[in-house]
Amino acid sequence: MMRRIMILAGLFLGLAGAAWFFGQGVLNKPMALPDGGLTVDVPAGMSLRALGERLAAEDVLQYPTVLVAYARLMGQASAIKAGEYEIAAGTTPRGLLQQLVEGRVRLHSLTIVEGWTTRDLVRALRKSSYIRFTESDADDKTLVRAVELPGPSPEGWFFPDTYRFPKGTTDRELLRMAHERMQVVLDQAWAGRAAGLPLRSPYEALILASIVEKETALDRERPRVAGVLARRLKAGMKLQTDPTVIYGLGEDFTGDLTRRQLSRDSPYNTYTRTGLPPTPISLPGEASILAAVHPDDSDALYFVASPERDGSHVFSATLREHNAAVKKYLESLRDNGK
């Protein structure tokens, strides 16, 4: 009897050992994946068994029962996370399980461009097939409430950057990410601001930065533009910036500002009103925000596009110098047939 028991025990141990080595071989052998990998959607509530059977039906996973048995042994069978996964070529079943348990989902990206308006941002959200819409058709008041913004307008409150997110992220979640980033950048900039600024709050710095953002695309010029605007504010001069007027016109702006539009009064017309407009006019980047709180200390009060037409500007301290610079710029346009 004892001999029979020993034989059976040995046979059992041998079979168990063979099964173990077989299982380890299966778990460590790369799956049959295309060279470019495979994208797999794991819906909420899907079991590992169901996923394994699906991959087996697609000839990707050879022995799904081995994967499920191993996951149960490790206490991970019910620990997989829903999401969209990018399974790289060379991934083993063991590696797949680890990826599913850790929730290493595929990330998509959306770039918020410096100088965009909030409406531009909302349009970009609506175009993304990876973002779930909840607020994209909302008006300004609804956006302010949904994202918990600290003001009456959403304009200016979203930081331009590239954001990475999993499929199914809501527009509200992405807007909150961008707003939280803007709040951090703005608070840090305001805390380190230069002395003597004609600005009473971080929000006014954001408004000024949004104008700087629209006035020049050159980082080296941003402090100079901010300096002109800051000195005009201190002197009680009108800012006289085209971008604020354009923003106020909204859809009425067709590409060229007319004298009539420049003379039409509105809260955003800095030719007819002194001080800053009531809200930002764009989403400013960090360079513009830093320029707004660290403007240059020259004596320039005016600027106009350079006759070189390279995106740079000519800065002047007096109206006479400025008029001469404007004349040169207009001559350059005529010389080039414009």
Image (tube, helix red, strand yellow):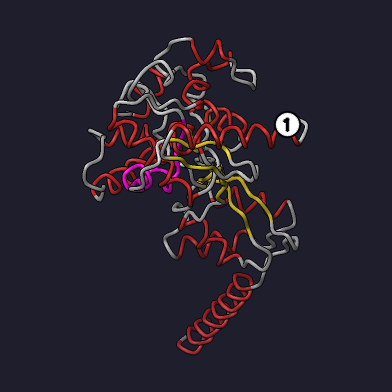
Residue identifier under label 1: 334
Number of numbered discs: 1
| Residue at the image point whose x is 62% and y is 37% from the top | 328
| Residue at the image point whose x is 38% and y is 17% from the top | 141
Q: Quadrant of residue 87?
A: bottom right
Q: Position of residue 284 (x, y in %)?
A: 44, 39
Q: Secondary structure at mark 1?
A: helix
Q: Amino acid at mark 1?
A: Arg
Q: Position of residue 70 (x, y in %)?
A: 51, 65
Q: Is residue 81 above or below residue 234?
A: below
| Residue at the image point whose x is 69% and y is 37% from the top | 332
Q: Which residues are magenta?
A: 282-296
**Is residue 58 shown left or right of residue 155?**
right
In reply to whether residue 107 is colored magenta, the answer given is no
List the single residue furthest toward the front: 320
Quadrant, the C terminus:
top right
Q: Position of residue 53 (x, y in %)?
A: 65, 51
**Is residue 141 shown left or right of residue 113?**
left
